[in-house]
Image (cartoon, rainbow, N blue to C red):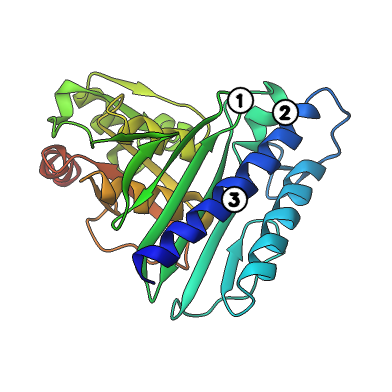
Amino acid sequence: MDLLEIKAVNTDVQRWLATAATNLRQHLTAHFQVQTKSGRNDLVTNFDKETEHFLVDQIRHSFPNDQIVSEEGFGDQVQQVSGRVWFVDPIDGTLNFVKQRNDFAMMIGLYEDGRNVLGYILDVMDNKLLWGGPSVGLHLNEEAISGPANEPLAAGLFGVNGPMFATNRESVRDIAFASSGARILGSAGLEFQHVILGRQVGYISRLMPWDFAAGKILAETAGLSVTTIDGDPINMLKSQTVLVTTHHALPEIQRIRQS
């Protein structure tokens, strides 16, 4: 895609997200139809499904030849990332959405032949949209921003997955203890936002593709490292333990895991 096409797509996506987010905010007092998926803390609501259906419909109408990977099943069974592939997470942090009516995000990522194009993480309740890509840079709402400082692990807070921290799986607790302190937000999108905005020095969690696709584009645009926990390249079509952090902190984290 050339820059003119990318700017046109950006206009469309921001309009879709604004419409979907407004609808969510207007219905926060409505009755939620809540179902469980893999367990009692893995929830899906009628709003997850309605929001994904809306976003997928917009993509299909505008880009009928593109593939879509989405959380609630309205996308495609994508086997390879050739061509343009969209990743859609309608409500990231559904447990927060249900229990708190806050601290949840909406995310869209666009790739072409496996390359980063555009990423969007919208903090729905604060109406803060972090967006960008390698051709357009990084933005918070209308403001162009730069990436965070390349801080060492000890200099910043570290976002973690709660169960991984509790059991020290993949040395997550040891890594967090070597930082300034652990943080658990309950939304991968908001965790990525905090790292990209310099509020945390890193984040580790087991994630699905729609959980990390947008964040990967934005974090790499911001000059951060996004890999598996072992330092390998991300597989865009599978669940894996994802690490986003500064390049300064990355070797420190690997040393902790190997000790």
Q: Is residue 42 visible?
A: no
Q: Position of residue 250 (x, y in %)?
A: 16, 43
Snapshot quadrant of residue 45: top right
Q: Do the residues labelled 2 and 1 touch (CB within 8 Å)?
A: yes
Most foreground residue, 59 or 166? 59
Q: Residue at point 47% right, 80% down?
A: 80
Assign the C terminus to one quadrant of the image.
top left
User: Mark 3 or mark 1: which is in front?
Assistant: 1
| Mark with earlier residue (3, 1) | 3
Instruction: Using residue 200 as the reference point, say whether residue 102 is left or right of it.
Output: right
Q: Is the residue marked by circle 1 packed among few (<14), some (14-19), or many (20+) residues within 10 Å?
A: some
Q: How far apart are marks 2 and 1 (CA)?
A: 7 Å
Q: Position of residue 48 (x, y in %)?
A: 73, 45
Q: Report the residue marked by disc 2.
A: 25
Rendered image: mark on residue 40: none
Q: Is the residue marked by circle 3 packed among few (<14), some (14-19), or many (20+) residues within 10 Å?
A: many
Q: What element carries label 2?
A: helix
Assign the N terminus to one quadrant of the image.
bottom left
Q: Residue at point 64% right, 49% down?
A: 16
Instruction: Using residue 126 as the reference point, say whether residue 138 is left or right of it.
Output: left
Q: Is mark 1 on a helix, strand or loop?
A: loop
Which amino acid does the dot numbered 2 rest on? Arg
Q: Residue at point 14% right, 30% down?
A: 151
Q: Report the residue marked by disc 1.
A: 125
Q: Report the residue marked by disc 3.
A: 89
